[in-house]
Image (cartoon, rainbow, N blue to C red):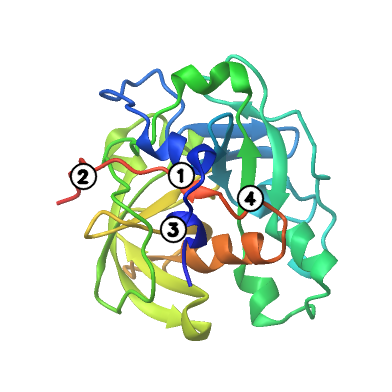
Amino acid sequence: SGCKSSSSNSSAAAEPVARDFGEPTAQQIRPGVKISSSYGSCTSNFIFAANSVTYYIGTAAHCFSDDANNGDPCESRNAASGFSGVTIENARFPGTLVYSSWSAMQQQGEVPASEQCRLNDFALVQIHPDDLDNVHPSALRFGGPTGLYNGLAAVGDEVFTYGQSSLHFGEPALEEKRGQITQVVADGLAYRVRTDNAGVPGDSGSAVLHEDGRALGVLSDVAVGVGTAPVSNGVVNLDRALAYAKNGGFIPASTVLLTWQTFSGQ
């Protein structure tokens, strides 16, 4: 499992990974920037590249669906691949939706209401080539990802995530969330995590970083705690979601996660 292209000897596949990005700035296209369209607003997770001119920014598939909050993902009405009306914070040009797991699972004939349907929520937006000089892989607030988390994390492991919902009113203490994994779901297709403050609509699609700095998952849903109970979030396993997109031929097999070795999650 995992990032199959890591062993590729192709110079095109290797080039974006070897690129010297320099120190990140707040004005760059980075994990954690806002992604918006006529379907609503979400938060981005990580930066990916298929070659030196094809870069993607990730978010959640339900951010591009008419049925984001109801119905079954495998029966949902989604934006078509090629939908170009995607605004990426700090980008000069609109991005283009090139992959939605919700659409892909319908094309693959996944059984509605199955665990695969319910727990695969991942989308990729291609960044306009003229914006590539302003891309940086370092996640806002926490840094990383230092790599892709292969295999399964464990209950009790600490996680870090950052959401750009307008309901946080720009307060860093609300945007930054720390928590722990409380459940491994469906043999690792997803996780449940509890965080120290509420994730709210608009945080969907956020990067979830493991305590060791690796890219663990994508924030998919938020369930508000009852009384004094902590907030619980559903997190898609990024390793599995990326493999599904590659194995189905929906994105190039050369697609890799772009990394940044400075990670400050404490």
- State the image coordinates of residue 78 (x, y, percent, origin top left): 81, 51
- Local packing at callout 1 (Cα closer than 10 Å; few below 14, some 14-19, many 20+) is many
Q: Nearer the viewer, residue 3 or 93?
A: 3
Of pointers 3 and 4, the one earlier in the residue sequence: 3
Q: Quadrant of residue 250?
A: bottom right
Residue 49 is at least partly visible in this image: no
Of pointers 2 and 4, the one earlier in the residue sequence: 4
- Report, in whole angstroms, how far the alpha carbon at label 3 lies from the one at label 4: 24 Å
Dots 1 and 2: beta carbons under 8 Å? no
Nearer the camera: disc 3 or disc 4: 3
- State the image coordinates of residue 238 (x, y, percent, origin top left): 48, 61
- Local packing at callout 4 (Cα closer than 10 Å; few below 14, some 14-19, many 20+) is many
Quickly name the residue at label 1: 46
Q: Nearer the viewer, residue 173 or 263?
A: 263
Horizontal relation, residue 34 to residue 6: left or right: right
Dots 3 and 1: beta carbons under 8 Å? no
**Image disc number at residue 123:** 4
Q: Amino acid at mark 3?
A: Ser
Q: Secondary structure at mark 2?
A: loop
Q: Amino acid at mark 4?
A: Ala
Nearer the camera: disc 2 or disc 3: 3
Residue 117 is at least partly visible in this image: yes
- Report, in whole angstroms, how far the alpha carbon at label 1 lies from the one at label 4: 11 Å
Of pointers 3 and 1, the one earlier in the residue sequence: 3
**Image disc number at residue 263:** 2
- Report, in whole angstroms, how far the alpha carbon at label 2 lies from the one at label 3: 25 Å
Quickly name the residue at label 3: 7
Q: Amino acid at mark 1?
A: Phe
